[in-house]
């Protein structure tokens, strides 16, 4: 197990991402933030809280569950328990900033785009991720905002620990070995 981001660097990365959003979206009058359930909302919560604390803007922030939009929903490999979608504003003609913790194959983001269309037609959709595993893409999806890029192989796993769940903010690269 290798530490990619410790608690101090984790905080710096989140603040940098927040400042990039402020630089690109100003007062957020035509932008909304949508965190992907379940783990993207930890990052989205932090970003929204930090941006609101330094700008005094009230951001439109929603949470999106993509369970029933996943292409592996009916494969029977694992039980998918839906989370709650909370989007109580229109995304019509807005710039939507989708937020997730790790961009891996791109399939989660494709599902999120499908789900988002049920709430209207955005002017633009941007993607913000904490970690981009760039060599693992199965679909042509890339992030507009990236906390850190990790070059990893299929046998490795990126594990993001959040203070809210695991009592400390950290990102690890874990080597998976097959049992013989």
Image (cartoon, rainbow, N blue to C red):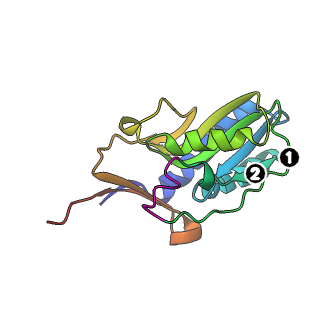
The image shows residue 145 at horizontal and vertical percentages of 57, 35
Q: Name the residue under label 1.
A: 89
Q: Which residue lies furthest to the left in this view?
A: 180
Q: Mark 2 points at which residue?
A: 62
The disc at residue 165 is none
Report if the CB atoms under discs 2 and 1 are less than 8 Å apart.
yes
In the rendered structure, which segment of residues is drawn in magenta? 71-78
The vertical placement of 37 against 136, above or below, is below
Secondary structure category for the residue under label 1? loop
The vertical placement of 143 against 5, above or below, is above
Q: Quadrant of the N terminus?
A: bottom left
Question: Which residue is at the front of the view, 56 or 1?
Answer: 1
CA separation in Å, label 2 and label 1: 8 Å
The reply to whether residue 74 is in sight is: yes
Q: Which residue is drawn at 70% across and 41% down?
A: 116
The image shows residue 76 at horizontal and vertical percentages of 45, 61
**Does the magenta segment cover residue 75?**
yes
The reply to whether residue 18 is in sight is: no
The image shows residue 117 at horizontal and vertical percentages of 72, 38
> Tag 1 or tag 2, which sits nearer the N-term?
2
């Amino acid at each position: 197990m290798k530490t990619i981001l410790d608690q101090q660097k984790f905080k710096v990365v989140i603040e940098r991402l927040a400042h990039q959003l402020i630089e690109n979206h100003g007062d957020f009058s035509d932008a909304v933030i949508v965190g992907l359930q379940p783990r993207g909302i930890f990052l989205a919560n932090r970003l929204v809280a930090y941006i609101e604390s330094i700008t005094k803007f009230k951001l439109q922030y929603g949470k999106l569950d993509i369970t029933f939009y996943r292409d592996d929903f009916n494969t029977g490999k694992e039980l998918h328990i839906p989370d709650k979608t909370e989007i109580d504003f229109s995304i019509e003609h807005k710039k939507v900033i989708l937020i997730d913790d790790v961009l891996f194959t791109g399939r989660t983001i494709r599902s999120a785009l499908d789900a988002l269309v049920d709430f209207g037609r955005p002017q633009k959709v941007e993607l913000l991720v904490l970690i981009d595993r760039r060599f693992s893409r199965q679909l042509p999806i890339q992030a507009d905002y990236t906390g850190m890029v990790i070059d990893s192989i299929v046998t490795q796993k990126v594990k993001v620990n959040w203070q809210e769940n695991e009592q400390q903010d950290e990102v690890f690269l874990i080597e998976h070995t097959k049992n013989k």
